[in-house]
Image (tube, grey):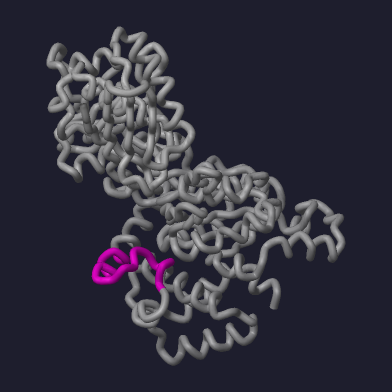
Amino acid sequence: MLAKVVTSALLGIDAFSVHLEADLTRSGMPAFIMVGLAEGAVKESKERVFTALKNSGLRLPASRITINLAPADIRKEGSSYDLPLALSLLAAAEVIPASSLDSYFLAGELSLNGSLKPIPGILPMALKAKEKKAKGLIIPKENAAEAAVVQDLSVYPVSTLGQTVEFLNKDRHIPAYICDIDELWNRRQDFQLDFNEVKGQDHAKRAIEIAAAGGHNLLFMGPPGSGKTMLAQRIPTILPLLKFDEALEVTKIYSVAGQLKSQEPLITERPFRAPHHTISDAGLIGGGQYPRPGEVSLAHRGVLFLDEFPEFKKHVLEVLRQPIEDGRVTISRAAVSLTYPADFMLVAAMNPCPCGYLTDDQHTCTCTPRQIQRYRSRLSGPLLDRIDLQIEVPNVAYKDLKQSQGTVDSKSMRERIQSARDLQSHRYKETPVRTNSELSGKWLQQFCALSEQEHEFLEQAVYRLGLSARAYTRILRISRTIADLEEAEDITVNHLAEAMNYRFLDRENR
């Protein structure tokens, strides 16, 4: 007898439907054949499924079994096919009615004793089930909260294979799992960090506010102990709150990567990722034999902090160019090409020299000019051009250290940033642009138009500092953000001058 069930497979951070067909023929020699471009873990499901059936007290007649996974031209991987395979075999053997599986989406990994284990990527599968107007989604109990984030979809959590069979035979009632989205959304807690804990560094705080208001990338350069990491860690506290569709997008990435916490089925705060400088290019960008999202994708809609910037391998840093420019990363393999979102705010920190004390008045630098040049040459010009704000972070003076707290707090900074973002949202509502950092081409000319006086000022600066065309574009974008923070309609010379002050490396190399 032939039985069909529907499950899902992942392609990037999205899911597509997979129709699993099982045919049991009692004539001929017993055999098990699986077709449909199944990878290792899928082929191994045979052993898990047959052992789980036996230990659950469920028997299949000796027969020739043929399994087809359609579409047959897309690779299937992972252990989520265990439950669909087991149930399709039981339906083909008439242990459960084949009609009971109609319109359900199924996914889950089986243990040898018949219990179900959670699997990654449930949220994209749930979204696909809703898109296909499925009757319901039958999945392991531990995945239920994550799947139930998708509204208007019945999610049935099951713990064992036997329990699932009883549910399909209508011998057991399993209520659909209910997720209170409002409760999850209101669970956001106040950040434990705040900018009022940072004493001094008013110039750096101003640069951070501009960067956050326009979605710009940022580089700190300063000696050890000047507070670069402390400043970076507090940037998520001033970014605008995630919208629901953004939160769903971020959660999908973490779900596919298997990094979604069971007690946090929906990510409601902007991510902050700080990988170590020994990370590989596959770890940073994503990839591997079976591609998975990297740190740039896990930082989507949030902050990617790269401390000790020049210590990262040069080829690792160079692969950052595409995601910085495009807001996404494409991983190509012989059999598949996957695109992951990677729209993040890059924050990098570095010392001015190998010993770290080149710009420190309290310590003597022991580095030779050649050592300093070699150290800084690890960062290519094209990569530095893609970082909008480059600022110097000096050591904090004692008069600032003795203050009880800093001059600004995260709440007031966030309010100003939100006002600037609201201006941008209104201004760009008819365009594909979201923030000032994305302005280019005709949109840059339209929204960063300068008068003759501003053009003359900028022309002199470009000639004197030897700025590249990309640096010129960066200055215009930063100026637009400074004007937005002041709620000014036009960019003035003062805005351009302040913007150029945040191109520290350009001024240093003049």
Q: Closer to the camera, 75 or 408?
A: 75
Q: How many marks do you count on the picture?
A: 0
Residue 345 in percent (x, y) is at 47, 55
Q: Nearer the viewer, residue 344 or 141?
A: 141
Whole-percent x, y for residue 62 in the image? 32, 16
Q: Give 227 or 43, whichever is nearer the viewer.
A: 43
264 to the left or right of 346:
left
For this view, does 14 lie left or right of residue 401? left
Q: Is residue 21 above or below residue 49?
A: below
Query: Is 367 positioned to the left or the right of 385 in the image?
Result: right
Q: Residue 236 in the image: state x and y as whole percent.
A: 44, 46
Which residue corresponds to the image point at 41% horizontal and 60% vertical from the top-left?
A: 213
Task: Assess whether residue 424 is covered by the magenta stretch.
Answer: yes
Which quadrant would residue 418 be assigned to in this image? bottom left
Residue 292 visible (yes or no): yes
Residue range corresponding to the magenta coloring: 423-439
Residue at left offset 31%, top offset 68%: 432
Q: Quadrant of the C terminus?
A: bottom right
- Would residue 470 appear left or right of 429 to someone viewing this image? right
Q: What quarter of the picture does the N terminus occupy? A: top left
Q: Residue placed at 63% from the left, 43% from the top?
A: 276
Q: Specify whether residue 184 is in view.
A: no
Magenta run includes residue 358: no
> In the current view of this chain or complex, which residue is farthest to the front?
28
